[in-house]
Image: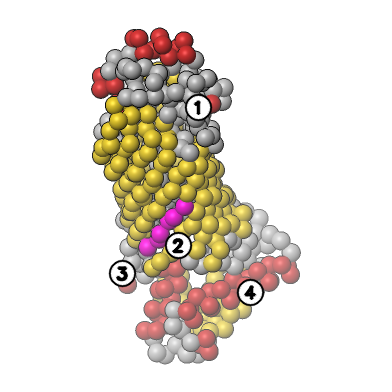
Amino acid sequence: MRKSLKTLCAALGMAAVVTASAPSAHALVSSFDVLNFKPAISNRTDYFTIYSSQTVAKHGWNAGFYVDFAHNPLEVAFPVLGRRFAGVVDNTITGNFYATYGLLDWFSVGMNIPVVFWLDYVNTLGPPFGTGTGTSDSMTELGDIRMELKFRILNNEDKLIGLALVPFFTIPSGDSTHFVGNGTVTGGIKIALDFNIHERVKLALNVGFLARDDVTIGGVRIDDQLLLGLGLSIKIIERLSFLVEAHTEPVVRDLFENEVQTPAEVLGGFRIKVAEHWDINVGGGAGLTLGVGSPDFRAFLGLNYNWAPEPCPACDRPAQVEARQITIDQVIHFEFDKANIRPQSYPILDDVVAIIKSNPSIKMVKIEGYTDSIGSDAYNMKLSQRRANSVKTYLVNKGIPASMLDAVGFGESKPVATNDTAEGRAKNRRTEFHVEQ
């Protein structure tokens, strides 16, 4: 097997010294956690374990759970003989139950509670030493509870790049003697960067740091860790996305020098939108190194619910009828250099739909699209036309007859502000709704 010489490998002499001086497993306090599948709980519906820059909507919720199976996440062996000499976790079935609440559009708070439904644990810290035998047990355990905040700095819904900070800490609620808890409080921060490569392709990069106790067990030292992750999301069809992720958490003290101190794993799977607000996540993966917590293989299944409050009441509506124009007090956002409408603009367009439906005197609406002066005149004219068509399609899908709508792109003509400043260009990128009849 790939991991016949598994995590916590040490020289025979080192093992003998550790065993001679080690206390019983139940006397351990500080330890390390082999539950390396940690859902990105503050995302909307972007990735499995990699963080995007997006937060849940203000006063919105993101909640759900994952169940994952990991085979051989922790083994200890003589490097030469392949015999175990320390605590072993052969198999785990773990549930992660999480919820995140949006306090502001750019700030959320969340919690994840891991529950180990099945832990196949073999204690070989004590005698008979080096025989590969010991006390075997299967049990149910609670893991370390994780609390986190998320601050969105850059919003990639209207930019090419998104940026968020995710500070977090864990509560030592897990059983450190069975390697499903650290035994002490840990904490750190992640920086989440994501990019819109294409209207259907997204890339996310995570870089972070975990501060934890310096622990040596079985000749292996686990200390503060660097957190690295990379995720790719490809939307195959509207309700189906393919995701692939890779992450590693090397010990900073001996950065990338010791494989046992460098757990790494790759995951792949699908996200399926089964109903409004509901997603199913399914996938699997495998460890890339012999590091602590890297399994031979992993399989997981998850269910996610994402909810956002309804748009503001009529008194605060973002769209109003004034004279012969339906005015909106917010910009309709599109993906960068594309005609795809950003989800954050759906409530504004829904309000336009409500106004048209509630005013029988409105017989025809002209949708006018405008751009700034970046790019050629011809390109901007085509882009504005595609964006006006996208708005028309959205309104038609919401029940407005296509015969009532006329979509026209005007490109960079008719600016309402200077194109010499970023603020002015932002005002010129706009969508207008004119009542024709």
Q: Report the front residue among 74 and 262.
A: 74
Q: Which of marks 1 and 2 is in front?
A: 1
Labels 1, 3: front one: 1
Instruction: Classify 308 as above or below 220.
Output: below
Say few, some or many: other residues with alpha carbon within 10 Å of mark 2 (under 14 / 14 to 19 / 20 or more). Answer: some
Q: Nearer the viewer, mark 2 or mark 4?
A: 2
Query: Residue at left 47%, top 52%?
Result: 283
User: Would you say residue 282 sits in the magenta stretch?
Assistant: yes
Q: Give the range drawn in magenta.
A: 278-283
The x and y percentages for residue 324 are 48, 82
Q: In which image quadrant can residue 33 be found? A: top left
Q: Nearer the viewer, residue 434 or 334?
A: 334
Residue placed under numbered mark 1 in the picture: 5
Question: Label 2 vs label 3: CA separation?
Answer: 32 Å
The quadrant holding residue 110 is top left
Q: Residue at x 49, y 45 (%)?
A: 285
Which element is circle 2 on?
strand
Mark 1, secondary structure of its residue: loop
Q: How far apart are marks 4 and 1 (CA)?
A: 62 Å
Q: How crowded is mark 3: few (under 14 residues within 10 Å), some or many (20 or more)?
A: few
Residue type at mark 1: give it.
Leu
Q: How crowded is mark 4: few (under 14 residues within 10 Å), some or many (20 or more)?
A: many
Q: What residue type is labelled 2?
A: Ile
Above or below residue 204? Residue 259 is above
Give the residue drawn at x 38%, y 47%.
Answer: 68
Residue type highlighted by circle 4 = Gln
From the viewer's perspective, is residue 193 above or below residue 5? below
x and y, in percent, of residue 372 in the image: 64, 63
The numbered dot on residue 385 is 4
Q: Mark 2 points at which residue?
A: 272
Mark 1 and mark 3 lie on one chain; the one further toward the N terminus is 1
